[in-house]
C-alpha cells in the first residue's frame, strides 16, 4: 500500500507544470554556467599550455597572452557576476549542484562536460545556421552588404518563377525513374548473389565497389566516358535511339533532356545499386529456410517462390531501400554537378509553356536538380536570399516526403 | 553373372547447367560493372592524343601512367601531395573527434534517464532531417562573422573544418551510439565505480572498449563520407585555401586543364586508390558498417 501511495505521489509531483517550467529554467541556467566555465577554463587552459614556451623567453608576453584569453571570456564573467548579484540563492544552489563534492554534483559535471563537445559543435554548425537560414530567406542578402529584411518577397519570386517549377518537375521525374531503376537492379543483383554460386562473394564485393568512389570524382569519370568512350563503343547509339532522341554530338550528356537524364540515371544506378543490394541481401538471408524447402516439396517453381515467398518477406527492406533511394535522389548534387553543372539547355516543354501562359519557349537547363539549383542560385549568381528561400522550400518538401514515408512504414509494420 | 553390375555410385560430379549459366551471367555483369574502372585505368596510362583518338585501345606501355603522375605532382598550382595529406589529416582527426565526442554524449544521455536527456537526444535526431543545402549559405556567413568577432579564423582553418564535421557527424553518430550503449549492461560500470573509478575513467577505460563494433561502423560511415566530401570543404575552406582537400584538387585540375583527360583520369585514379585499398583490407567491416548505418 505504501508503495502504491508513493508512486501516486511521484506522478502528481511530476505533473506540476510550474515545476517543469522551473526545471527547464534551471537547466538553461545550468547550461549557461557550464558554457561559461568551460569556455573560461578551456580558453585559459589551452592558452597556458600552448604558450608555455613563450614564458621562458618573456614572462611579459606570456602574461599578455593570458590577459587576452581572459578578455575573451570577460563578457561571460560579467554576465555571471550580474547573475550572482541578482539571484544569490540560485547562484549558490547552482554552484552547489555543479561544483559541489557529492556524487550528484560529479554526475552533473560529467553530464555537461561529456555532452558539451558534441552539443556545442552541433548547435554551432547545424542549428544556428539553420535558424539563421530562416532569417536570411526573408532578406535580400547578396553576400557583400548587410542583408535587408524583405519579408516574403523571395518566396513570392520563387513561386512565380516557372524555372523553379521546372526544376522541381525534373527532380521529381529523376527521383521516380531513379528509384525504379536502382531498386529493380539492386533486387535482381541480390537474387543473383544469394544463389549458391562459387563467385558470389566476389560478385558482392564487385557490385559494391562503385560505392567507394566519391560523387565528384565519379562525375568526372563519367564525363570522360560519355564524351569520349561511348562514341568508340558504338553499340550504345542504338540503345539511346531506342530510349530517346538520336545522339546529336555523340554525347549522351549534352544532347537533349531525356538523353542527359538517362545518362545520369545509368551512372547513379551503377553507383548505388550495390549498396541497396546489400540491404536486400540481408533481408533475403533472413527468410526462414523451412518455407523455401516446404514450397519446393509442394512443387513450386523458382518464379512462384519469388512471387509468394521472397517478395512479401523482403517488403520491409523494400521500404528502407525506397526511403534511402528517395532521399539520396532528391538530394543528388555532387555527381550531377561534376558531370553537367546543371545540364544541357533545352526548350521548355510545351505543357509548361501553356501552364504559365508564356509566349515563347525559353531555354532551360534540363538537369538543374533542386540541390544544384540552390547551389547555382547562391554561389554562381550570388542571390543568397533567394537561394536560401529555395533551400527552405527544399527542406520542407524533403521533410514532408520523409514523414509520409515514415507513416507508411509504420502502417506496414502493423500489418506484418 | 556377367550381367550383374557392381553397385558403385557414379562419382563424376553432375554438371549443373543453370548454375554455370548463372555464373557466366554474373561474370558478364561484373565485367560491365568494372568497365568504367577499366576505362579509367587504361586511359590513365596514355597520352592525351592517344585517348582522344581511341579511348578503348590498350595503352602501348603502362609506364606512361608514372609520367602522368609525375606531371601532376610537379604542378605547383594543383598542390596534389599537400591536398592528399590534408585529406588524410582532416579525415583521421575528424573521425577521432566525432567518435569520441558522440560516444561521450550518447553515454551520458543513455545513463541519465531524465526528460532533459530525452529532449537533447531528440534534438540531436532532428539534425538528421536537415539537408546540407539548407545550412550551407548561412554557415559560410556565420564562419566569416565568427572569424571577424573572435579574431580566430574559422574559414580555411583546420579547427573550422573539424568543428564543422563534428557538428554534421553528431546526429547519426549519437543515434547509433545511443542504440548500442542501451544494450551494454550497467553492472560493469557500477562495479568499476565501487572499485574506485571516477565517472570519466569508467567511460574511457571500460565503456569505450566495449563500443568497438559500433565505433568501427561509424569509422566506415563517416570516413567514406568525409574522404569523398566536396561541398562542405569547398565552402568552409574555399577552393584555393591552404587546407584544400583531394576532391578539390581533382576539381581544380579539371577546371585548369580542360580536356586534358590523361591528367584528369590519373588524378581520379590516384584519389580512388586509397579507398579501394582500404576496401580490400576491411571489406567485411565496410559492407557491414554501410548496411547497418542504412537501417537506422
Image (cartoon, rainbow, N blue to C red):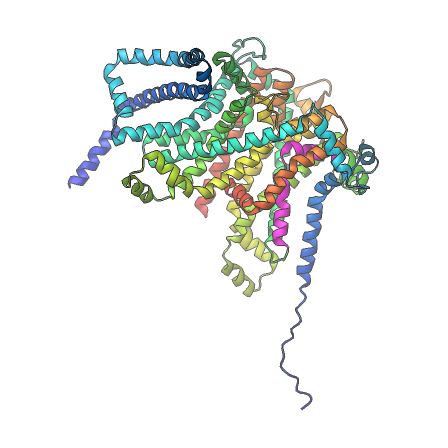
Where residue A53 appears, as percent x and y from the top left, is 46, 20
**Image position of B43 (left or right of B202):** right
Front residue of this view, candidates A227 and A79? A79
Q: Quadrant of residue B238?
A: top right
Tell me: residue B222, above or below residue B233: below
Tally of numbered discs: 0
Front residue of this view, candidates B236 and A335? B236
Tell me: residue B175, above or below residue A393: below
Identity of the residue furthest to the front in this view: A56
Q: Residue at x 31, y 12 (%)?
A: A81
Where residue A321 appears, as percent x and y from the top left, is 55, 41
**Image position of A199 (left or right of B183):** right
Where residue B183 appears, as percent x and y from the top left, is 38, 44
Where residue A165 appears, as percent x and y from the top left, is 62, 24
Whether residue A169 is visible, yes or no, is no
Q: Is residue A328 magenta?
A: no
Q: Is residue A200 magenta?
A: yes
Whether residue A12 is visible, yes or no, is yes
Q: Residue at x 55, y 47 (%)?
A: B284
Q: Quadrant of residue B6?
A: bottom right
Front residue of this view, candidates A402 and B222? B222
Q: Residue at x 73, y 38 (%)?
A: B40
Identity of the residue furthest to the left in this view: A2
**Image position of A59 (left or right of A258):** left
Q: Where is the N terminus of chain A found, in terms of image quarters?
A: top left
Q: Which residues are magenta?
A: A199-226
Front residue of this view, candidates A68 and A297? A68
Q: Which SS type dominates the magenta stretch?
A: helix
Amino acid at each position: 500500500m505504501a508503495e502504491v501511495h508513493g508512486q501516486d505521489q511521484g506522478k502528481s509531483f511530476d505533473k506540476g507544470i510550474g515545476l517543469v517550467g522551473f526545471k527547464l529554467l534551471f537547466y538553461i541556467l545550468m547550461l549557461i554556467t557550464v558554457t561559461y566555465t568551460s569556455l573560461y577554463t578551456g580558453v585559459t587552459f589551452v592558452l597556458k599550455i600552448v604558450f608555455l614556451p613563450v614564458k621562458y623567453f618573456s614572462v611579459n608576453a606570456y602574461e599578455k597572452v593570458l590577459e587576452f584569453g581572459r578578455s575573451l571570456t570577460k563578457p561571460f564573467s560579467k554576465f555571471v557576476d550580474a547573475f550572482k548579484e541578482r539571484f544569490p540563492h540560485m547562484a549558490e544552489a547552482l554552484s552547489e549542484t555543479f561544483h559541489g563534492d557529492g556524487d550528484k554534483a560529479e554526475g552533473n559535471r560529467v553530464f555537461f562536460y561529456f555532452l558539451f563537445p558534441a552539443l556545442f559543435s552541433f548547435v554551432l554548425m547545424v542549428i544556428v545556421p539553420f535558424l539563421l537560414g530562416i532569417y536570411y530567406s526573408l532578406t535580400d542578402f547578396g553576400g557583400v552588404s548587410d542583408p535587408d529584411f524583405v519579408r516574403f518577397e523571395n518566396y513570392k519570386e520563387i513561386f512565380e518563377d516557372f524555372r523553379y517549377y521546372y526544376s522541381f518537375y525534373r527532380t521529381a521525374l529523376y527521383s521516380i525513374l531513379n528509384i525504379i531503376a536502382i531498386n529493380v537492379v539492386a533486387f535482381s543483383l541480390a537474387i543473383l548473389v544469394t544463389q549458391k554460386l562459387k563467385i558470389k562473394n566476389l560478385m558482392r564485393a564487385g557490385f559494391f565497389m562503385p560505392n567507394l568512389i566519391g560523387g565528384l570524382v565519379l562525375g568526372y569519370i563519367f564525363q570522360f566516358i560519355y564524351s569520349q568512350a561511348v562514341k568508340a563503343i558504338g553499340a550504345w547509339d542504338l540503345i539511346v535511339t531506342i530510349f530517346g532522341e538520336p545522339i546529336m554530338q555523340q554525347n549522351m550528356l549534352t544532347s537533349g533532356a531525356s538523353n542527359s537524364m538517362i545518362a545520369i540515371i545509368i551512372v547513379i544506378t551503377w553507383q548505388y545499386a550495390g549498396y541497396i543490394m546489400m540491404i536486400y541481401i540481408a533481408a533475403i538471408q533472413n527468410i526462414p529456410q523451412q518455407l523455401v524447402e516446404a514450397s519446393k516439396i509442394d512443387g513450386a517453381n523458382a518464379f512462384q517462390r519469388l512471387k509468394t515467398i521472397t517478395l512479401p518477406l523482403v517488403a520491409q527492406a523494400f521500404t528502407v531501400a525506397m526511403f534511402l533511394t528517395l532521399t539520396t535522389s532528391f538530394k543528388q548534387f555532387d555527381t550531377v554537378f561534376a558531370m553537367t553543372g546543371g545540364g544541357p539547355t533545352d526548350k521548355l516543354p510545351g505543357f509548361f509553356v501553356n501552364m504559365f501562359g508564356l509566349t515563347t519557349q525559353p531555354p532551360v537547363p534540363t538537369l538543374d536538380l533542386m540541390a544544384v539549383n540552390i547551389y547555382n542560385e547562391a554561389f554562381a549568381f550570388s542571390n543568397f536570399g533567394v537561394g536560401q528561400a529555395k533551400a527552405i522550400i527544399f527542406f520542407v518538401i524533403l521533410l514532408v516526403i520523409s514523414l509520409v514515408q515514415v507513416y507508411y512504414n509504420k502502417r506496414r509494420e502493423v500489418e506484418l | 553373372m556377367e550381367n550383374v553390375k557392381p553397385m558403385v555410385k557414379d562419382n563424376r560430379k553432375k554438371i549443373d547447367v543453370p548454375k554455370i549459366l548463372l555464373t557466366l551471367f554474373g561474370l558478364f555483369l561484373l565485367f560491365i560493372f568494372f568497365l568504367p574502372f577499366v576505362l579509367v585505368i587504361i586511359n590513365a596510362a596514355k597520352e592525351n592524343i592517344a585517348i582522344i583518338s581511341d579511348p578503348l585501345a590498350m595503352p602501348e606501355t603502362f609506364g606512361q601512367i608514372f609520367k602522368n603522375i609525375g606531371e601532376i605532382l610537379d604542378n605547383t598550382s594543383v598542390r596534389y601531395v599537400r591536398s592528399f595529406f590534408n585529406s588524410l589529416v582532416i579525415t583521421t582527426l575528424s573521425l577521432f573527434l566525432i567518435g569520441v565526442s558522440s560516444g561521450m554524449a550518447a553515454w551520458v544521455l543513455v545513463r541519465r534517464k531524465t526528460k532533459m536527456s530525452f529532449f537533447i537526444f531528440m534534438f540531436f535526431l532532428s539534425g538528421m532531417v536537415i539537408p546540407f543545402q539548407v545550412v550551407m549559405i548561412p554557415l559560410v556567413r556565420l564562419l566569416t562573422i565568427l572569424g571577424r568577432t573572435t579574431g580566430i579564423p574559422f574559414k580555411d582553418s583546420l579547427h573550422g573544418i573539424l568543428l564543422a564535421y563534428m557538428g554534421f557527424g553528431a546526429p547519426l553518430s549519437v543515434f547509433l551510439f545511443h542504440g548500442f550503449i542501451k544494450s551494454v549492461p550497467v553492472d560493469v560500470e557500477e562495479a568499476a565505480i565501487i572499485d574506485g573509478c571516477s565517472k570519466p575513467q569508467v567511460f574511457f577505460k571500460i565503456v569505450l572498449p566495449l563500443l568497438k563494433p559500433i565505433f568501427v561502423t561509424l569509422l566506415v560511415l563517416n570516413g567514406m563520407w568525409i574522404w569523398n566530401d566536396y561541398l562542405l570543404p569547398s565552402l568552409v575552406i574555399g577552393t584555393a585555401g591552404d587546407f584544400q582537400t583531394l576532391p578539390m584538387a581533382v576539381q581544380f585540375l579539371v577546371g585548369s586543364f580542360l580536356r586534358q583527360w590523361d591528367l584528369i583520369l590519373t588524378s581520379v585514379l590516384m584519389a580512388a586508390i586509397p579507398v579501394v585499398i582500404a576496401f580490400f583490407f576491411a571489406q567485411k567491416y565496410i559492407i557491414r558498417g554501410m548496411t547497418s548505418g542504412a537501417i537506422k
